[in-house]
Amino acid sequence: MPEPKNQSHSDNASEKAIDSLRNEIESLRSQLKKKDKRIAGLDVMLKQIAESHNTEIRAYKGVKSALDS
Protein backbone atom coordinates (compact mmCIF):
# COMPACT_ATOMS: atom_id res chain seq x y z
CA MET A 1 0.00 0.00 0.00
CA PRO A 2 2.90 2.47 -0.17
CA GLU A 3 1.87 3.46 -3.69
CA PRO A 4 -1.39 5.18 -2.73
CA LYS A 5 0.43 7.08 0.02
CA ASN A 6 3.10 8.26 -2.43
CA GLN A 7 0.48 9.00 -5.06
CA SER A 8 -1.56 10.91 -2.51
CA HIS A 9 1.50 12.95 -1.54
CA SER A 10 2.22 13.59 -5.21
CA ASP A 11 -1.40 14.53 -5.86
CA ASN A 12 -1.36 16.84 -2.87
CA ALA A 13 1.82 18.53 -4.09
CA SER A 14 0.33 18.88 -7.57
CA GLU A 15 -2.84 20.44 -6.17
CA LYS A 16 -0.78 22.91 -4.13
CA ALA A 17 1.27 23.80 -7.20
CA ILE A 18 -1.89 24.27 -9.28
CA ASP A 19 -3.48 26.44 -6.58
CA SER A 20 -0.30 28.47 -6.29
CA LEU A 21 -0.21 29.02 -10.06
CA ARG A 22 -3.89 29.98 -10.12
CA ASN A 23 -3.30 32.49 -7.34
CA GLU A 24 -0.29 33.92 -9.17
CA ILE A 25 -2.28 34.24 -12.41
CA GLU A 26 -5.12 36.00 -10.59
CA SER A 27 -2.66 38.36 -8.93
CA LEU A 28 -1.07 39.19 -12.28
CA ARG A 29 -4.49 39.78 -13.85
CA SER A 30 -5.37 42.15 -11.04
CA GLN A 31 -2.10 44.04 -11.45
CA LEU A 32 -2.67 44.23 -15.21
CA LYS A 33 -6.16 45.67 -14.73
CA LYS A 34 -4.75 48.33 -12.41
CA LYS A 35 -2.02 49.19 -14.90
CA ASP A 36 -4.54 49.31 -17.77
CA LYS A 37 -6.66 51.76 -15.77
CA ARG A 38 -3.60 53.86 -14.98
CA ILE A 39 -2.55 53.90 -18.65
CA ALA A 40 -6.07 54.94 -19.68
CA GLY A 41 -6.02 57.74 -17.10
CA LEU A 42 -2.64 58.96 -18.28
CA ASP A 43 -3.81 58.82 -21.89
CA VAL A 44 -6.78 61.06 -21.03
CA MET A 45 -4.48 63.49 -19.22
CA LEU A 46 -2.09 63.55 -22.18
CA LYS A 47 -4.91 64.31 -24.61
CA GLN A 48 -6.20 67.12 -22.37
CA ILE A 49 -2.74 68.65 -22.08
CA ALA A 50 -2.18 68.37 -25.84
CA GLU A 51 -5.53 70.05 -26.54
CA SER A 52 -4.74 72.82 -24.05
CA HIS A 53 -1.31 73.28 -25.61
CA ASN A 54 -2.79 73.51 -29.11
CA THR A 55 -5.33 76.06 -27.87
CA GLU A 56 -2.52 78.13 -26.34
CA ILE A 57 -0.51 77.97 -29.58
CA ARG A 58 -3.52 79.12 -31.61
CA ALA A 59 -4.15 81.97 -29.17
CA TYR A 60 -0.50 82.99 -29.30
CA LYS A 61 -0.51 82.97 -33.10
CA GLY A 62 -3.72 85.03 -33.10
CA VAL A 63 -2.26 87.62 -30.74
CA LYS A 64 1.03 87.71 -32.63
CA SER A 65 -0.80 88.15 -35.93
CA ALA A 66 -2.88 90.96 -34.45
CA LEU A 67 0.20 92.70 -33.10
CA ASP A 68 2.06 92.34 -36.39
CA SER A 69 -0.80 93.89 -38.34
Image (tube, rainbow, N blue to C red):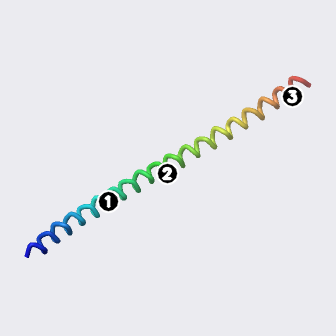
| 9 left or right, relative to 51 | left
As drawn, which residue projects farthest toward the left? Answer: 1
Total marks drawn? 3
User: Which residue carries the number 2 mark?
Assistant: 36
Quadrant into which the N terminus falls: bottom left
| 57 left or right, relative to 50 | right
* Residue visible at 81% across and 27% down in the picture: 63
Mark 3 or mark 1: which is in front? 1
Q: Position of residue 67 (x, y in %)?
A: 86, 23
Of residues 28 and 52, the one nearer the viewer is: 28
Task: Say which label, 3 or 1, has the lower sequence index.
Answer: 1
* Residue visible at 28% across and 58% down in the picture: 20
Which dot marks residue 65?
Answer: 3
As drawn, which residue projects farthest toward the front? Answer: 2
Question: How far apart in space, not on screen, are marks 3 and 1 (Cα)?
Answer: 65 Å
Position above or below: 25 against 50:
below
Q: Position of residue 45 (x, y in %)?
A: 58, 41
Question: How far apart in space, not on screen, are marks 2 and 1 (Cα)?
Answer: 22 Å
Which dot marks residue 21?
Answer: 1
Q: Position of residue 28 (x, y in %)?
A: 39, 54
Quadrant into which the C terminus falls: top right
Question: How far apart in space, not on screen, are marks 3 and 2 (Cα)?
Answer: 43 Å
Q: Amino acid at mark 1?
A: Leu
Q: Amino acid at mark 3?
A: Ser
- Counting other residues with Cα less than 10 Å from the Cα at mark 2, is it few (<14), some (14-19), or many (20 or more)? few
SS of the residue at dot 2? Answer: helix
